[in-house]
Amino acid sequence: MGLTQALSTSLAGLNATQTGLSIIAGNVANAQTPGYVAQSATQIAVLGGDFGNSVRVTAINRMLDTFVQQQLRTETSGGAYADMKANFYQQLQQVYGQPGSSTSFDAAFNNFTSAVQALATSPNSAAAQGQTISAAQAFAAQLNTATANIQSLRGQADQGIASDVQVANNALQQIATINQQLQSTSVNDSSKATLEDQRDQYIDQLSKLFDIRTATSGNDVITVFTTSGTQLVGTQAAQLQFNPTGSITAAQQWNSDPAQSGLGSITLVPPGGGSGIDLIANGAIRSGEIGAYLNMRDNVLVQAQSQIDAIATQMSSALSDTTTAGSAVTVGAQNGFTTDVGGMLAGNTTQVTYTDSSNVQHTVSIVRVDDPSVLPLANAVTTDPNDTVVGIDFSGGMASVVTQLNTALGATGLQFANPSGTTLRVLDSGPGTITVNSVATTATATTLSGGSGALPFFVDVGAPYSGAITAAGSQSVGYAGRIQVNAALIADPSKLVSYQAGTPVGDATRPNFIYDQLSNASPQFSAATGIGSATSPYQGTLSAFLSQVVSTQSLATTAATNLQAGQDIVVNALQTRFNQSSAVNIDTEMANLLTLQNNYGANARVMATVKAMLDTLLQM
């Protein structure tokens, strides 16, 4: 080897060593910097040429396991989802109260029924009457407060989505900017690794907000997608749009049809503009904080509201509704029943059961509707899976009602007529056709002196509760937030006993009716409550349903807490594993430093020797 070759080789070694020392200095300086990934240099031997063998640094690499990194991002998304759900469930649990506690729903309801039971024992006691009113007011107030708290939680989730969307948009823009910068950065430039660290931090931010996946192209551009395949960012960033609702009511619910939705959706607008993609309607967000917010706002908390609405509606109806069986009637060769529908309010029903020629029994619920814009009604308004619902507009009078019924149900063999007044007659089509088994009409009491035990004990901000359906929605939605004890009953508690003129002072008829309805009535509850199903709805007493609600929420809270704990373990384990491969290890860096110092010294000695030899040659 000539002197020039030796000098060139040692100079290349010194340059490579200097790069290595700079990397070590950077690693040590950033050992505690969040998101920093340890760096190393890739060196190759350069053989031959006029200047002999040498070494060259071809790249500065980050020391990370990309597989573990992707797994960590996936589990981080799941962990953020579990954390947020557990947080909301714990807040929701406070709405229902701890099972068995004096502040729980079932305890407040039991106080009410106990007060009514005491009233039935001493109906002429003014104190017992007052205690019954007070207990009813306390339970109604608890339903009101629960509704306010649940809707407040929905509003909190809505605002959380808005905040996270802002964070996501910033992260998407930063990723696009860094992708553009990396395209013009040399592979052996140390700033490249720094930019990649910054980009990873923004991608990690996204993974906490919702579930994502990434793909890397040959020019070092990372493209980010949702796990459903929707592209979010490459060298250009899409933008998320979301309009927070602010104060949310029970009637405001998300719908995939924007014209019917009462809440904001998340729209992904492409970099070049144009029509956006509704990420909620497309199911593109399944995890992360935003996924949890959406699930709580649009599902869990809506179901929670349905549960307390069911309690309020069934309790009101149990005390105010009276079902009267129709009277059998024969007209020529036709048989059937008559029923008076004059007392029906919007939402009240007349139920017809009949057996067809194949000996199959059918049930039809004729629902009074005063707002024709909601017709036809869906079967969803009933809790009975074997019930066919027919909405009839009563606003046009009985002749119109009969015409509508014959049009809607004439094919079944049922024939309807109005012999007089508000009487509805339901007949078969004659011998050998169908058999009308029964007809019964349910009507809601509107006065405290109705001549029976039924009374409008609870009202909807002063109006009777009958389950009316209008263009604004069903009266049942959010009713728990509006339920009140009838003001006329508060003004005159004696109406808890006196149900008609001349009722004896100590008559227990009405108190016994109230207690029996609260304790023994066994209605069916909608599958929207999450208790029971559409094909097998839950049926039981109000007390049993309340216990189911409190127990179900308690179990859901426990399950969410357990999921959070389990997910945290997985995330922490993956984070530890990732840190082991990517974090700076000071011991390793010191060992590398010693090696580089030796290399530096060896190359320096070669250069010193070459210099001395050249000096000697020049002096000759």
Image: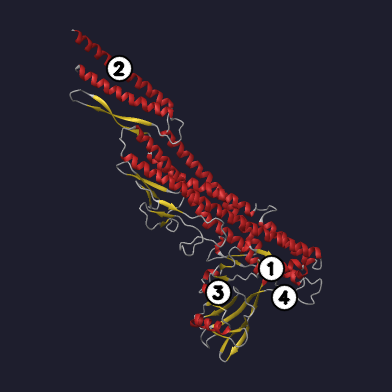
As shown in the figure, which amino acid type bears the numbered disc 2? Ala
Which residue is at a point 25% across and 13% down the rendered structure image? 611
Q: Which quadrant, please, contains the N terminus?
A: top left
* Disc 4 to disc 2, C-alpha distance: 110 Å
Q: Which residue is mark 1?
A: 517
Mark 3 closeness class: few <14, some 14–19, many ≥20 residues within 10 Å: some
- In the image, residue 223 sits, relative to residue 155, either above or below, namely above
- At mark 1, the secondary structure is helix
Does label 3 or label 2 sit earlier along the sequence? 3
Does any portion of residue 545 appear in the rendered image?
yes
**Residue 560 place in picture, x, y as percent:** 55, 49
Residue linked to disc 3: 371
Task: Name the residue carrying label 4.
Answer: 452
Mark 3 vs mark 1: give the one in front.
3
- Considering the numbered disc 2 on the image, is that residue within a helix, a strand or a loop? helix
Identify the mark at residue 604; answer none if there is no mark.
Answer: 2
Answer yes or no: do the residues labelled 3 and 2 have beta carbons within 8 Å?
A: no
Disc nearer the start of the sequence (4/2) = 4
Image position of 56 (left or right of 442): left
